[in-house]
Image: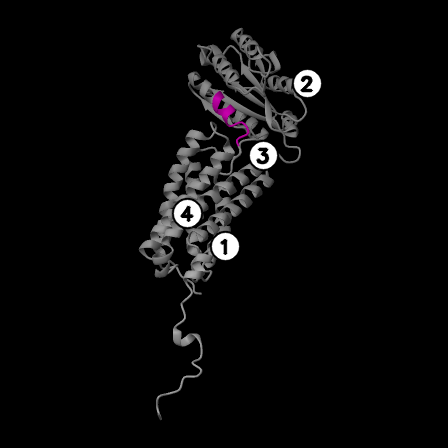
């Protein structure tokens, strides 16, 4: 039992982690939102296990500093067979922890009711001459799931309820909502954000069913007066996020107010200079609705929750421990399993902190945060053999049996009855 460090294993583990990160980003980009997020995140961590396992195996084949030459001669074939087991372990643990992370605890309500509040003031004739905001609203309604409810409000000097909260589960209701949107036209008047938000809250309070959360999408191109701290308190109390879209805003006080509304209620602000991009922005808001995975930013009403922050970190700790244990199983070495497992606890804690406090609304920076988290997972585990002593100790019966030396004949039994030839 001694402390060892295989620098080649550290290097290959980091390379394996970097390759796994690239594959994981492709997985998130193409399948997250198309496949169940629980399965996608499980596959993400299974890919990390595969990358680190392959890198570690190749490093020990070249320089078996941790397992010794006897491992390479006798047990290398077994290690290749055990590698899929480590991948399956991470797949299962990743799926389990993502499932727990997506559960809604306490009074938390999943967002199912969506209220679109659309600026119809006269200035929209210049900001959106092609009425792209209406087509964007129609496209979003057609994209929504059947368990959603949707309402449509317009506002200028006054707010008008075009369509109250309507369930999209019933046949024909989706066409009813889109038909109501088709009747909308730009009016003349100012921008009364206060009245629009007040009327949107009335719609939610009057029609939102118990156990369902609500969200508001507010689009405007103008400047208005609003006491955010006072007039938005009801939204804060109900946990209703207001996602704001600023269209072609030239006066800096306009974006400042919309940003304040979004920040106060836990929503996001989107700055749009081209009205033709509105459909993409509406779709992006909906796709981020309730987004909560272990490796992406929380965008639902748990965004600032310390409980879900702690749960993310704890989940990464368990995933790191499983990764280290799986690597020890690959090498069929109980001492390595212990060392790598403890290293996985530390690396998972560091990776969890990195994800929890590093993820933001910026896509490229989020990718870099995930890269750092994966490198912490793989690198710290590989370093831990320099802290926790390791030696040869097989996990399987086969390993223990093959390492037993066969006794020599002269060492087996005493030679009773034999006399020396001397003296005769």
Q: Looking at the image, is mark 4 or mark 2 earlier in the sequence?
A: 4
Is 8 in the magenta?
Answer: no
Give the magenta part as a residue range: 282-291
Q: Is 93 situated left or right of 214 in this image?
A: left
The quadrant the N terminus occupies is bottom left
Determine whether label 2 and label 3 are within 8 Å by CB. no
Viewer-side label of 4, 1: 4
Q: Looking at the image, is mark 2 or mark 3 earlier in the sequence?
A: 2
Q: Looking at the image, is mark 3 or mark 4 earlier in the sequence?
A: 4
Q: CA distance from mark 4 to mark 1?
A: 20 Å
Disc 2: CA contacts within 10 A as few (<14), some (14-19) or many (>=20): few
Q: Nearer the viewer, residue 60 or 402?
A: 402
Image coords of residue 113 (percent x, y): 60, 21
Q: Nearer the viewer, residue 1 or 291?
A: 1
Disc 1: CA contacts within 10 A as few (<14), some (14-19) or many (>=20): many
Q: Residue at x 47, y 34 (%)?
A: 40
Question: Which residue corresponds to mark 4?
Answer: 83
Residue extending furthest toward the bottom: 423
Is residue 372 among the parts visible in the rendering? no
Q: Is residue 213 above or below residue 15?
A: above
Q: CA distance from mark 1 to mark 2?
A: 54 Å
Q: Looking at the image, is mark 1 or mark 3 earlier in the sequence?
A: 3
Image coords of residue 423 (percent x, y): 35, 93
Residue extending furthest toward the front: 424
Q: CA distance from mark 1 to mark 3?
A: 30 Å
Determine whether label 4 and label 1 are within 8 Å by CB. no
Question: Which residue corresponds to mark 2?
Answer: 206
Determine whether label 4 and label 2 are within 8 Å by CB. no
Question: Which residue corresponds to mark 3?
Answer: 302
Q: Which disc number belongs to residue 342?
A: 1
Q: What colour scheme was applied to this rendering of the protein?
A: one colour
């Amino acid at each position: 039992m001694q402390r060892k460090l295989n620098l080649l294993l550290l290097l290959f583990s980091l390379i394996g982690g970097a390759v796994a990160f690239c594959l994981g980003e492709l997985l998130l980009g193409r399948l997250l939102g198309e496949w169940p997020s629980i399965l996608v995140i499980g596959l993400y961590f299974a890919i990390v296990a595969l990358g680190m396992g392959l890198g570690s195996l190749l490093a020990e084949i070249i320089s078996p500093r941790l397992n010794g030459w006897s491992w390479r001669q006798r047990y290398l074939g077994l290690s290749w067979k055990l590698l899929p087991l480590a991948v399956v372990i991470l797949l299962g643990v990743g799926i389990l922890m993502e499932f727990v992370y997506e559960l809604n605890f306490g009074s938390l309500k999943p967002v199912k009711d969506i209220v679109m509040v659309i600026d119809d003031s006269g200035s929209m004739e210049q900001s959106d001459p092609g009425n792209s905001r209406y087509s964007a609203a129609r496209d979003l309604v057609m994209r929504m799931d059947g368990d959603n409810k949707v309402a449509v409000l317009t506002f200028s000097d006054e707010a008008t309820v075009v369509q109250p909260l309507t369930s999209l589960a019933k046949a024909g209701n989706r066409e009813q909502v889109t038909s109501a949107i088709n009747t909308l036209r730009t009016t003349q008047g100012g921008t009364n954000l206060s009245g629009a938000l007040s009327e949107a809250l009335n719609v939610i309070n009057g029609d939102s069913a118990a156990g369902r959360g609500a969200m508001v999408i507010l689009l405007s191109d103008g400047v208005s007066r609003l006491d955010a701290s006072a007039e938005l308190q009801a939204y804060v109390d109900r946990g209703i996020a207001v996602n704001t879209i600023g269209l072609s805003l030239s006066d800096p006080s306009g974006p400042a107010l919309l940003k304040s509304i979004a920040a106060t209620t836990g929503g996001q602000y989107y700055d749009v200079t081209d009205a033709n991009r509105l459909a993409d922005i509406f779709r992006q808001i909906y796709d981020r609705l309730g987004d909560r995975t272990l490796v992406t930013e929380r965008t639902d009403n748990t965004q600032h929750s310390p409980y879900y922050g702690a749960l993310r970190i704890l989940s990464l700790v368990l995933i790191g421990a499983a990764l280290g244990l799986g690597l020890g199983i690959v090498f069929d070495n109980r001492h390595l399993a212990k060392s790598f497992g403890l290293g996985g606890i530390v690396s998972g804690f560091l990776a969890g902190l990195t994800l929890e406090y590093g993820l933001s609304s910026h896509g490229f920076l989020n990718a870099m945060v995930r890269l750092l988290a994966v490198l912490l997972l793989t690198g710290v585990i590989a370093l831990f053999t320099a802290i926790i002593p390791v030696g040869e100790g097989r996990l399987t019966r086969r390993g223990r049996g093959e390492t037993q030396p066969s006794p020599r004949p002269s060492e087996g039994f005493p030679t009773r009855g034999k006399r020396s030839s001397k003296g005769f």
